[in-house]
Each structure stands twice: as C-alpha cells, then as structure tokens.
Amino acid sequence: MMKTAGLPLFRLILAFFFLAGAQSARITFTNNCPSTIWPGTLTSDQKPQLSTTGFELASKASRSLDVQAPWKGRFWARTRCSTDASGKFSCATADCASGQVACNGNGAIPPASLVEINIAENGGKDYYDVSLVDGFNLPVSVATQGGTGDCKTSSCPANVNAACPAELQVKGSDGSVLACKSACTAFNQPQYCCTGDFSTPDKCPPTNYSKIFEDQCPQAYSYAYDDQNSTFTCSGGPNYVITFCP
Ligand SMILES: *[C@@H]1O[C@H](CO)[C@@H](O)[C@H](O)[C@H]1NC(C)=O
Ligand SMILES: *[C@@H]1O[C@H](CO)[C@@H](O)[C@H](O)[C@H]1NC(C)=O
C-alpha cells in the first residue's frame, strides 16, 4: 500500500521541480547611448546573485541574461568608468564600490536610474518600473516581450540632468552634469525621504524637488510614495528588454 501510494506523490514532486526549474525570463540589455556603459544587476532577498552582476556594454551593443522565476531585483548602468593604475575599477555615476566590473551583490551608489523587476513564478503577475527614487544618471526604459495583460513599456526617456537644479547636480571634472541626486540623497531630510513623521503615503506628498523628476519622466517613480502611473504589470512569463538611452 505504502509503495503504490508513494509513487504518484514522488512523480508529482518531480514534475513540480521540472516545471519550476524550466521557467525563466530572458532579460536583454541594449545600449543606445553614444558611449560605453557598464550595467549592474542586484538580486534582492538574500538569494544567490545572477550569473553576471556587472558587465561592459559598448554603444549599440546588446547582451541577454536568463533569470529563474521567481525573481526580484534591480538593474542600472554605470557611466564614465575606468581602471586606475592599481587595477581598481570605478565609475563616475552609479558605481557599486566593488572595485571590479562585477558588482558582486553591491547595489548602485545613488544617484542612479533604476529598473526594478519582480518576476512571479508559474506565469503569475510580474511587476516592473523605472525608479528615480535614488536619483537619475541616464535615460532608461523597460519593455516586455510576450506575456498577457497590460504589458506596457515603462520609460524615462528624458535627460533629467538637463533639468537638474544646482543643489542636486553631480558634476564631472569637465563641469558637465553627470547625474541628478534625489532630494532625499542630497538633503537627507524626512520630508524628502518619507521617513520619521513623513513615513506614510498620506504624510509624504510630492515636493518641489520630486516634481522636477515627475515632470521630466511621468512614468517613473519620482519619490518613495509616488504611485501615479508608475507601476506596470504583465502576466504569463514575459521576457524583458531594458534599453539605456531609449
Ligand atoms: C524647494 O523648496 C525649498 C524649501 O521650500 C527651497 O529652499 C528650494 O529653493 C526649492 N527648490 C526648488 C528647485 O524649487
Ligand atoms: C495617469 O494615466 C492616465 C491614463 O493614461 C492619465 O489620464 C493621467 O493623467 C495620468 N496621471 C498622471 C499623474 O500622470
């Protein structure tokens, strides 16, 4: 009795692992910017990191990466990177402080334009967005391929650096604006960071600074509680295309 009852259960477990293991999403990165960039990847929730946590991507080049579902994490791109005489790699924007091209589980140091993707298991509902909560360094979009439901492209195509007020600017040695800090990063005050007395959505309205980001890129998160048209969903296991300088 035990043996005949055990076999179907064993098969069910095998089938479960087969199906769960078979489901993955392909993420393609395209660099449409005029210069080389260095994308970074960060897996949330203490999971093992992806097969690459950072790589070089020449102008007009693309590279794909397969991600096992379920998965949650973020992507960004570093700009103006170089390796110094001692072999230490660093970037003028969105550096991950690993000293290498691979970020090895480190996130981007703000300011950085972020693509956040939350991939559901078994073809459930994915969530994705472009976030400027940690500031902006370059324009970016995230589009789905396949999938069912809304599946709209989320894009921040504007050069927010050109609209960045002086107190938020990160400048290069040549004086050009390389990135734009969030007010939270620049001033570290509760009303901009939605912390302390401002830690709930009703107590943390948009500010004159978050409105600058909102005006430039209405589809992107401009501050912690910005939910206006900034969350995008797609079901059925879509693939993703992330384009820098769309
Ligand atoms: C935003 O508001 C603060 C505080 O009222 C003010 O000091 C600052 O100049 C304003 N900045 C912009 C860009 O409007
Ligand atoms: C959100 O999107 C709707 C429909 O596309 C549009 O009518 C509305 O103005 C948008 N709201 C904001 C705050 O951008």
Image (tube, rainbow, N blue to C red):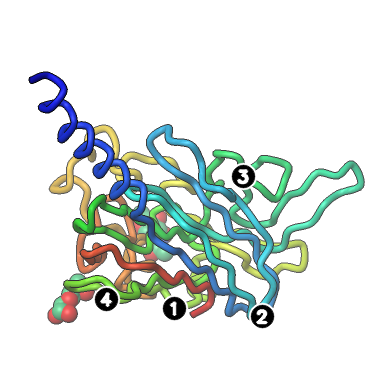
Say if mark 3 contacts mark 4, CB within 8 Å: no
Q: Nearer the viewer, mark 4 or mark 2?
A: 4
**Residue at the image position 38 percent from the left and 60 percent from the top:** 25
Q: Residues within 10 Å of mark 3 (few under 14, many from 20)?
A: many
Q: Is residue 20 left or right of residue 124?
A: right
Say which of 223 and 22 sits in front: 22
Residue 157: which numbered mark, if any?
Answer: 1
Quadrant containing ligand 2 reads: bottom left
For label 2, the residue is: 34
> Residue tagged by mark 3?
103
**Which residue is more in the foreground, 216 or 229?**
229
Residue in front for this viewpoint, 159 or 29: 29
Q: Is mark 2 within 8 Å of ligand 1?
A: no
Which of the two labelled residues, at mark 2 and mark 1, occupies the earlier sequence position? 2
Q: Are marks 3 and 2 in contact (CB under 8 Å)?
A: no
Determine the residue located farthest toward the top in the rendered image. Answer: 2
Amino acid type shown at disc 4:
Lys
- Tell me the SS state at disc 4: loop
CA separation in Å, label 1 and label 4? 15 Å
Relative placement, left or right, of 11 versus 182 is: left
Residue 152 - label: 4
User: How far is disc 4 from disc 2 in space, using C-alphas?
Assistant: 26 Å
- Alpha carbon separation for disc pair 1 and 3: 25 Å
Q: Earlier in the sequence, mark 3 or mark 4?
A: 3
For disc 4, the neighbor class at 10 Å (few under 14, some 14 to 19, many from 20) is some
Mark 2 falls on what kind of element? loop
Find the distance from the CA under tag 3 to the CA under tag 2: 23 Å
